[in-house]
Image: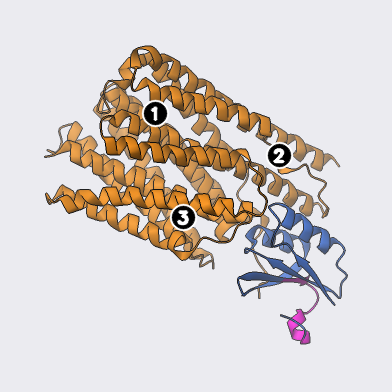
Amino acid sequence: MKITGLSLEQAPPILIPFKFFLTASVFALIVGVVMTIAAEATFLSRWSPLALGITHLMTIGFLAQVMTGAMIQLLPVLAGSPIPAVITFSRVIHLSLVTGAPLMGFGFIYSNQSVLVAGATLALFAIALFLIAMALSLIISNSRHVNAIPLGLGWMAIVPTVVMGIYLVMGLSGNVVIADMQLLTNVHLSWGLLGWVGIVLFATIFQLIPVFYVTKSPSNLFGNSLFVFVFLLLVLYSLSLYFDNQIFTFSLAIIIALFLLLSVALYQLIQERRRKIIDMTLVFLWTGLACLGIATIVWIVGDNELLVGVLLLGGICMTIPIGIIYKVIPFLCWFHLQSMMVKQGKLSSGLPSMKHFIHDTDAKRHYLLHLLAISLTAAATLTPGTLARPSGIAISLSSLYFFRNLLAALLRYNRQQRAILET
Amino acid sequence: MEQQLDVRELEPPVPLERILEALEILSMDDWLLVRHSREPYPLYSLLREMGFAWDTRWQNSECLIQIWHAERPPPDRQGIGL
């Protein structure tokens, strides 16, 4: 029995996720602007300083911010385990990411090793701090949420990603000698994209879908076991750094197959939802899953690494988090306002619906712009001469629209907050 | 007396709205038994703020939340709880 429980203060202030998501959209805009200026040089090779810079602006500037910002808010809602000292933790994490991402990105682009090392150190600091905060929240709370396992594994995967990343940076600056730079880079990005992003994204979606769309809970296989397999297979794949054996490299193919299996399971879960309404979150999600399928086909055909990269980074790593944000932000706005009403002793809400904060038409317009941006960028890997600059412009416009939708939601929230305080 | 509320098939934020509506009219001697498909963590902070106590248990894949006025003894101490 619990008579003393969570306090309202344990629901993190709503400005925290907004701050993370708004600055993430700014980094996506920076990526678009850099691509517009650099034009076809962006698509020369995945190994070019420019491509590496853009990749890290996207992964640290956009993805890391979106994922840490979302987790800080979702932990109390999904697992009942709020981050301790959340304002201080989130402020330092946000500041470190906001300064680390551009230093890393432009450190790569201008081949400036000291700037790059400074950026990587800040990113490492931010991620380490977030991991400590997340571990503390799970230890302090009484929650023994079973789905914390895949989320924990996903976040653990960022450790080898960052360690290898730092080692690669040291190799680039000549401080250490790396025998096979290409292989180490592949292992680094596999841990990053398949381990960290892949596991955390899928584990989060498998938790959110039953909550927001009232479906049955995923089976233990999809809820936990497959994620553990993915993690173990990544460990196996990493052994290819030391042993030249096909079995280690083959594990990568099995991981891809497992993610396809997870995608099918997710699709089926969504199909079983009580209300068969299709909202923009689902459209973003399905688009992301479709990109995973296309990326797999291109990877098997094996003649366009850049296209695989675009489909993974833009098609999945941007699309799916945007869809999640369009579901989570309206709920958080509603919940925080509801909490405020309760504090004032008003139980019956009379609050606007969740759709008030991000209108369907705005999410739809953003989706169309985003789809255009991803399609143009994917096509630009084939014809960079004509499509490189338009793809950069499309990414910039799509990111600006994302920023606009988030800002509109924040302003609508503030307006409602004022109305509650004035009555 | 026990009041019951089944929110298992409702999408957020409707379950929370329905629970708050039910609590608004819950008399001092009554308690509310909510049948939920998940553990509603965000609800707890609101309950505490509103002066309610609660007890959460899982039964047959259902989350049962018993809510009563905090100044009253828990229903199970009266031999009529979950």
Q: Dot 2, how many residues are within 10 Å of its Cα: few (below 14), some (14-19), or many (20+)?
A: some
Instruction: Return the x and y of residue A335 as percentages of the image width and height.
Output: 69, 49
Q: Chain of mark 2?
A: A
- Quadrant housing the N terminus of chain A: bottom right
**In this rendering, would A276 be left or right of A159?**
right
The magenta segment is B66-79
Q: Residue under label 2, please give it.
A: A355
Tell which chain the image draws in orange. Answer: A
Q: Above or below — where is A80 with respect to A311?
A: below
Q: Decide: marks 2, 3 in contact (CB < 8 A)?
A: no
Mark toward the start of the polypeptide (1 vs 3): 1
Q: Amino acid at mark 2?
A: Lys
User: What is the quadrant of the C terminus of chain A in the image?
Assistant: top right
Q: Which residue is mark 1?
A: A102
* Mark pair 1, 2: CA separation: 34 Å
Which chain shows up in blue? B
Question: Badge 1: how crowded within 10 Å, few (<14), some, or many (20+)?
Answer: many
Q: Secondary structure at mark 2?
A: helix
- Residue denoted by label 3: A134
Q: Is residue A266 left or right of residue A421?
A: left
